[in-house]
Image: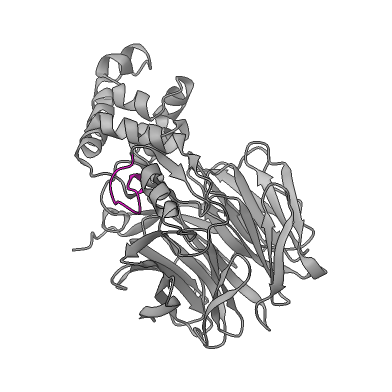
Amino acid sequence: MIALKMASAIHTLRDHRDDVNCCAFSATLLASCSGDKTVRVYSLNDFSELRFSPLSGHGYGVHWCCFSSCGNYLASCSTDATVIIWSMDTGEIMLKYEHPGRSPVRVCALTPDSSLVLSGASDGTVALWDFQSTTLRRTGAVTEATVAACSFTPCGQMFVTGCTLGDLKIWDLDLVQLHTQKDAHDLGVTCCQCDSISHIDGERVKFRLVSCGQDSQLKIWIISQHAVAGCHMQLLHTLKAQSGPVVSCAFSSDGQLVVSGSVDKTVTLYDGSQGVLLHTLSQHERYVTACAFSPSLPYLASGSMDNTVIVWRLGDGLSGRKCAGHSGLLVSDWAEEHVAAWLAEEGLEELVSAFKGHNIDGPELLSLTRDTLARELSIDSVGLRGKVMRKIEELRAALVGSAAPDEFLCPITQEVMKDPVIAADGFSYEREAMESWIGAKNRTSPMTNLPLQTTLLIPNRMLKMAIGRWRATQ
C-alpha cells in the first residue's frame, strides 16, 4: 500500500530570469542552470544561495549541469561551446573545455570517478576529455543530428548518447560503437540516464537506462554487456502517463524510483522496477524541463520554463525504507556534511550548527550519549535529547543488522574483501582474486569484459578502512 502523503513541495526557488534547463544534487547542494546564462547553487540545509552564487562564466544560455560524485566540483555546458568545471568551495572556474568546432554544447557528463568529461554538441559530435589535464582524448561524429542526451554507465567504461533523430547508441571510451537502438523515441530523444547500480549475471554485466522523448513516452531499458555476445538493449517498460513530450528523466540513487518532467507541466514518479505510476505532481505553470533526485535526502527537484525550481520532499511511500547511510555509505563512513543532511532529514535542522561546531561525523554521531548531548553540545531540552538519541539508536540498529554492502563484495568471489585493490577498469577487487584472474592471462575486465589498459593494481585503502569499520560493528 502506498502512503497517502506521496510528495509535498517544501521550497520554491525563484532566482532565475529565464527558463530553468537542468537541476542537479550533491549530498549537500542543489544546482540549477538557465537560459539566463547563470548557474545557481543552494545549500540543502536551508535552501539559501551560496555566497559565490550565481556562477556567471558562460556567455550564452546554460543547458546542463552535473556534480562530481564527491560533490567538490560542478560541471556546466552552454551554447558558448564550452564545458566549465567549478569549485564548490570557492565558486571559481577550475577548468574549461572548448568543444571542437565551437559547436553549442547541449549536454555533458562526468565518469563516476570524475576522471573523464564528456560533451555532446549540436553538430552531432562528442568530445571526451581528461578531467585534470583538459587534454582532448577523443572526438568524433556520433549522429547526423544534435546530441541531446548522454550518460556514463556505472563502470565508467562506456557511455550512452541520445539524439534528436530518436536513436540511442552505446560507445566505449575509444568511440567504438557497441550498439544502436534505432528509433528508440519517435521524433527524438530528449534525455537519458543510466542507473548507478550494475549487476553481474553469469558472464554478463547488466544495468538499466531510462530515456524519454518527443513521443511523450518514458522508457526503461536493460543493457547487458558480454565479452563474446557484445552489448544488447532490451526494453523493460514503456510508460505513457504524460500527455506531452517528456523532456527530462532520472533514476533515484538506489534505482527504486524514476522521475520525469513533461511539456504537459507535470512531474511523474514511477516505481523503477515495476514501471508503476506512483504519483503526479502538478504545481509548475509551464513546461517541466528538469528533474533530479537528491542522493542523500528524500528530496526531488524539478525545474521549469516558469523560471522556478521546486524542491519536493518524498513521503514514506516513495522515499523507501530507512537505510544505514546516505549515498550508499555506512553511518560509520559519514562525513560532517552527511550528518548535517541526516539532521535536516529528521527535522532536526536547529542542531546542525551545534553538530558542525563540534565536528560531529559518522563515528562521533554513533558514539553520542544523552550525557554528551547535554554536556558537550549544550542541548538543554530533555525532550530534544531524547528524540536525538532515538534517531541514533535507529541508526545503530540498522548498522548492526545490515548485510554487507554490495561495494564491500569482490565482484569475482562475491565475498567481503580483505585486501581490496583498484584495477584499470575502475572497479575494486580482492587482491588475490584479481591477481589470479590476471595470472590466467585474462587482460579483460571481469566487470565489463573490455580490455584492461594495464594490469597494475592500486591498494584501495579507503575501502579497506570502511570494511574494517563495518566488520567492527558485526
x%, y% of residue 341?
42, 39
x%, y% of residue 201?
31, 66
x%, y% of residue 318?
30, 58
Which residue is at the far top?
375
Closer to the camera in the image, 100 or 192: 100
Closer to the camera in the image, 38 or 84: 84
Q: Is residue 249 something one can see in this rendering?
A: no
Q: Main secondary structure of the magenta part?
A: loop
Tell me, yes or no, whether the highlighted magenta stretch contains residue 196. Answer: no
- 405 over 125 or under it: above or below: above
- 326 over 241 or under it: above or below: above
Residue at 46% of width from left, 23% of height from top?
359
x%, y% of residue 100?
78, 67
Closer to the camera in the image, 189 or 341: 189
Q: Is residue 398 something one can see in this rendering?
A: yes
- 407 over 2 or under it: above or below: above
Closer to the camera in the image, 128 or 440: 440
For the C terminus, the image quarter is: top left
Residue at 23% of width from left, 42% of height from top?
402
Residue 271: quadrant of the picture: bottom left
Left or right of 160: which side holds 435?
Answer: left
Q: How is the image coloured?
A: one colour
> Which range is magenta?
407-417
